[in-house]
Image (tube, helix red, strand yellow):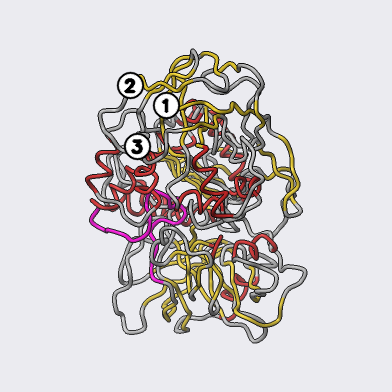
Amino acid sequence: MARLLSVNVGLPRNIAWKNRTIRTGIWKNPVHGRCRVGRLNLDGDGQGDLGGHGGEQRAVFVYQIEAYRHWQKQLGRTDFVHGQFGENFTIEGLPDDAVCVGDRYQIGSAVFEVTQPRVTCYRVGIRTNEPKMPALLTSSGRPGFYFRVLREGEVGAGDEIVKVGEADERITVAEINALLYSPNHPRDRLERALRIEALSQGWRASFEALLQSQTSDARRSGNAGLAPAAASHPVSPGFRPLVVTSIDREALDVISLSLQHPDREPLPPPLPGQYVVLRLPRTEGPPLIRSYSISGPRSTEGYRISVKIEPNGAAGNYLNEHIHAGDIVEVSSPRGGFTLEPGERPVVLLSAGIGATPVLAMLYALAAARATRQVFWLHAARDGRHHPFAHEVRRLMLALPQGRSFVCYSRPDPRDKLGEDFDAPGRLSQPAFKDIGIPHEADVYLCGPTRFMADMKQALAAFGMSPGRVHMEIFNGGESLTPGIVGAAMRAPHPPEDAADSGPLVSFARSGIAVHWKPSAYASILELAEACDVPVRWSCRTGVCHNCESGLISGAVAYEPLPLDQPADGNLLICCSQPVRDVVIDL
């Protein structure tokens, strides 16, 4: 007979961890007496990170006393208490290899349904004082599971757990867990899992991505169910020498370089919106590593990149002053997940300044296909002299039967003609979206300076645009994911205070930082990136969740600990990797 041994609750609180402050609700303490269970929570309970925990599908976390005994033996521990793993219900019975997603149980006067295995994060490692615990829970097949609440009620320690229903598809929590996190993803098992009505939306999306990766024409390595969008479309690491065939002035502060193979051999075709990475030598110090969007049409004959010349921009000034037609530069294969998605939904290409480059490549693709979908080109520039690609865009828009362009100049020059060179003075803002007639179901592709991106993201949200429809490209770093961290000051990427002068060189391409690896100071490339204030994404920190999966532009790494499932070829997991030679990473 399965029994409820302890009901555990706790509200979020701040704790100190690695010189940072974390907001977490993983500290749970037993309740004396009975406790009311609501649709989203137990009375007196809360979650510190609602992005990763809580909600209707993850209202109650359940862990078994049998798993406690396993970990006590494995780790030689005798100090575990109920709630140690952050669970709301400590139970006896119902092991993960017997309970199926979709099974329903009555406890006290409440009724529950199993929705998914637990998704482990670094905070369970903090709570158990075992940093590897996220990986251990997942790899052992003892993750525990979540309930959603079908009927609210009261529960208490000692209540019997009575099975009152089960899913038609019988797949256990342990099997569901392994299907996502292990390297083995059989198609028939994925299809069976997707037939479980009770399966939570997050896990459903992961299995759909895995299934899609098996059925697409371009089958890929890695775990498509876990990899973030930024890590999609990986390519083999390395640089190839390309010749500069021409250099053209696009605006007062923008030049374009056209690149071809020296022997005119075909190049890997880019997807609209992708970029290449250049490695530029210097007489002193490490080479300059910079990413530039491909701003021309999709072609295997050559690439066009466009570069803004900033007063203090080392790479832009190097290209402007030292590179000429006929010179050779080292260039990576096209990469990046900011790409035009197929379909018939309306498209909004929203940019400012040099941010026009990736969306211009998308416009080329739409024009070449004579797309009949609605296409909106929205661009912000200072004035006509700082407005690159103006004539190109006008020509391309003529090929789109439902194309509309809208250009704002923040400080128009007296020579700029309203209605001809630009459509409105000032800046792009939310009211303009309604005036232009942007549909709420459109896909938005957004690129530009940091402030512009933040303003447009806020304006689109206020306009009612779904966040899932807004795709962004950020070149000076990326959007970070540091769950639970609070009060962290935003700093520009920089070398660490204790920078080494030898060892493998680790270059963070988007952040423009290159530092030598110091194994005595850092256990992983993630820790080095954090010391440099490079924007990073992570959750488990032990090679499980793949939130940290990033592009490996060149070089090679070793893993310690080994990830549960390898990243895609051409990517790496920064949370558990160390460089074995010079590396360039897409961060």
Residue 320: % across, % down? 58, 74
Indicate the secondary structure of the residue bearing disc 3. loop
Type of amino acid under label 3: Gln
Q: Residue furthest bottom?
A: 283
Give how far apart the Cα atoms at labels 3 and 1 are. 61 Å
- Return the residue nearer the eye: 184 or 438: 184
Indicate the secondary structure of the residue bearing disc 2. strand
Residue 155: % across, % down? 55, 18
Q: Quadrant of the N terminus?
A: top left
Q: Is residue 27 above or below residue 164?
A: below
Decide whether the magenta segment is chiefly helix, strand or loop.
Answer: loop
Residue tagged 3: 374
Horizontally, residue 348 falls left or right of residue 282, namely left
Foreground tag (2 vs 3): 2
Residue depicted at x 48% and y 16%: 110
497 magenta-colored: no
What number is the disc on residue 1?
1
Residue tagged 2: 165
Q: Residues within 10 Å of mark 3 (few under 14, many from 20)?
A: some
The residue stretch that appears in magenta: 216-236
Query: Does label 3 or label 1 sit earlier along the sequence?
Result: 1
Horizontally, residue 19 falls left or right of residue 450, namely right
Tell me whether circle 3 and circle 1 mark residues in contact (CB < 8 Å): no
Q: Residues within 10 Å of mark 2 (few under 14, many from 20)?
A: few
Type of amino acid under label 2: Gly
Residue 51: % across, % down? 55, 37
- Return the residue nearer the eye: 114 or 418: 114
